[in-house]
Image (tube, grey):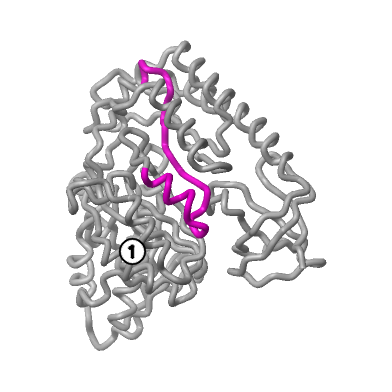
């Protein structure tokens, strides 16, 4: 494809799915830029003649969004609006033969680990010297840091090992180099992500090394906030809590997907943990790191979930009073252990159960937020929108958690800067305040 008309080509990368996909798109973006391609990420101009779609294949809704997006651009190609269409990511990794058959207008499909092949097809060289370097698609002041790839966990409902392979950690040195590059370019918040961050280091160093990794990142000047995501509860490395407590630049925040609480469902889901141990873990986290915000995700309607199981889950959400809760309705995935089971909870029941959980959590979130009125928090500001500066406290991750809103008429702050904000009002999921001069 690298011809004398190359300068007329423009590439638009479309990213669907999770933060791990965002990192993959940023790496692709960087490689193409280094090869002097005219490339943008999710451009609204619709002037690109080459489209690359980075797909998600995790659950039904995500898969449908990916398929709809592919079909939309396949139609654009048929209409002559674009010249080339490439698809990569999890959906392509998992369903390549089916996709090639059903949507043949795509020029080529690539899996999650086929970046060099995709670049070669585009006429670009894979530049090894760029390993660890990315052009951010997020605002410059925060960036996702993927510390490993793949997953070794046997969770019944999850197809990630099928799409992403076995767990492979990045080395300390590779991660430190990446963080140093990010902060050099103005990144202040590092969001640590992985399919399972608590497994970090086991394959490379023979032991779980999350605590040491957090310490090393924390030592890097300019890493003002470090935020831990996707910490698997079973065999949780307790020494990581000591580091979170002791380091001022590590946010008092942890994202720990629990999925369920009843012993029946935890066993069916193959989570490797019991209700008793889960409750003890939540208690230990709170004891070791005073004031920590705990975020979790849950699943409603997994095969075998009874009314009794769901009642236990509701009771847990009511009594544990976690700071943040998200919930998915179970999605039947072929190739998974649960995929061999009967999907015996009707969709409407799944949705009712999910709505019930969120109703409970809404009241909890409202009560927690009310307690913040009159207090002052350090806030990192992400954007200006509708006459307001919008940011987050250390207890909130981008996209999924609470936001702090400040009237732009009476307050001023630069996007990407920190400021102290006194909270004056609170809603169920947001805070309103004024900047302390």
Dot 1 alpha-carbon crowd within 10 angstroms: few under 14, some 14 to 19, many 20 or more: many
320 up-or-down from 394: above or below: above
Which range is magenta? 239-265
Viewer-proximal residue among 208 and 398? 208
**Residue at image x 74%, y 59%?**
406
Q: Position of residue 59 (x, y in %)?
A: 37, 38
267 up-or-down from 83: above or below: above
Could you tell me if residue 49 is visible in this image? no
Viewer-proximal residue among 151 and 96? 151
Q: Quadrant of residue 34?
A: bottom left
**Given the current orientation, which residue lies at the most extreme right position?**
410
Could you tell me if residue 158 is visible in this image? yes
Q: Quadrant of residue 216?
A: bottom left
Q: Position of residue 433 (x, y in %)?
A: 76, 55
**Residue at image x 54%, y 43%?**
292
**Residue at image x 22%, y 42%?**
162
Q: Position of residue 108 (x, y in %)?
A: 22, 60
> Is residue 30 part of the magenta span, yes or no?
no
Viewer-proximal residue among 202 and 92? 202
> Is residue 251 part of the magenta span, yes or no?
yes
**Residue at image x 55%, y 27%?**
320
Q: Secondary structure at mark 1?
A: strand
Q: Position of residue 165 (x, y in %)?
A: 20, 46
Viewer-proximal residue among 279 and 351? 279
Residue designated by label 1: 52
| Quadrant housing the N terminus | bottom left
| Quadrant housing the C terminus | bottom right
Tell me if 176 is positioned left or right of 171 in this view.
Answer: right
């Amino acid at each position: 494809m690298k011809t004398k008309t190359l300068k007329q080509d423009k590439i638009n990368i479309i990213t669907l799915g999770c933060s791990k996909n965002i990192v993959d798109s940023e790496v692709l973006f960087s490689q193409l830029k280094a090869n002097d391609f005219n490339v943008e990420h999710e451009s609204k101009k619709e002037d690109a003649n080459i489209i690359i779609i980075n797909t998600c294949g995790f659950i039904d809704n995500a898969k449908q969004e990916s398929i709809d997006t592919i079909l939309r651009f396949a139609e654009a190609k048929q209409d002559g609006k674009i010249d080339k269409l490439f698809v990569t990511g999890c959906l392509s990794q998992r369903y390549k033969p089916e996709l090639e058959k059903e949507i043949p207008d795509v020029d080529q499909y690539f899996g999650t680990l086929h970046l060099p092949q995709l670049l070669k097809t585009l006429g670009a060289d894979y530049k090894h010297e760029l390993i660890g370097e990315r052009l951010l698609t997020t605002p410059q002041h925060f960036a996702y840091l993927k510390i490993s790839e793949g997953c070794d966990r046997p969770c019944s409902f999850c197809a990630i090992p099928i799409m992403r392979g076995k767990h492979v950690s990045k080395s300390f040195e590779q991660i430190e180099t990446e963080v140093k590059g990010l902060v050099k370019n103005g990144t202040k918040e590092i969001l640590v992500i992985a399919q399972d961050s608590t497994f970090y280091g086991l394959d490379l160093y023979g032991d779980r090394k999350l605590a040491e990794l957090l310490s090393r990142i924390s030592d890097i000047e300019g890493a003002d906030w470090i935020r831990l995501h996707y910490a698997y509860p079973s065999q949780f490395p307790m020494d990581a809590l000591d580091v979170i407590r002791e380091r001022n630049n590590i946010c008092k925040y942890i994202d720990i997907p629990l999925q369920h609480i009843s012993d029946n469902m935890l066993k069916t889901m193959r989570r490797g943990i019991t209700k008793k141990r889960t409750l003890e873990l939540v208690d230990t986290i709170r004891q070791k790191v005073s004031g920590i915000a705990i975020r979790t995700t849950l699943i409603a309607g997994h095969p075998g979930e009874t009314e009794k199981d769901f009642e236990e889950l509701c009771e847990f959400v009511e009594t544990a009073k976690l700071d943040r809760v998200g919930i998915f309705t179970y999605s039947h995935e072929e190739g998974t252990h649960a995929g061999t089971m009967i999907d015996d909870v009707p969709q409407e029941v799944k949705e009712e159960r999910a709505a019930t959980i969120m109703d409970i959590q809404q009241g909890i979130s409202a009560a927690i937020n009310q307690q913040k009125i009159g207090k002052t928090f350090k806030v990192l500001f992400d954007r200006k929108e509708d006459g307001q500066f919008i940011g987050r406290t250390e207890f909130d991750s981008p996209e999924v958690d609470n936001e702090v809103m400040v009237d732009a008429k009476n307050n001023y702050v630069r996007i990407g800067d920190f400021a102290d904000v006194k909270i004056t009002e609170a809603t169920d999921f947001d805070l309103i305040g004024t900047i302390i001069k």
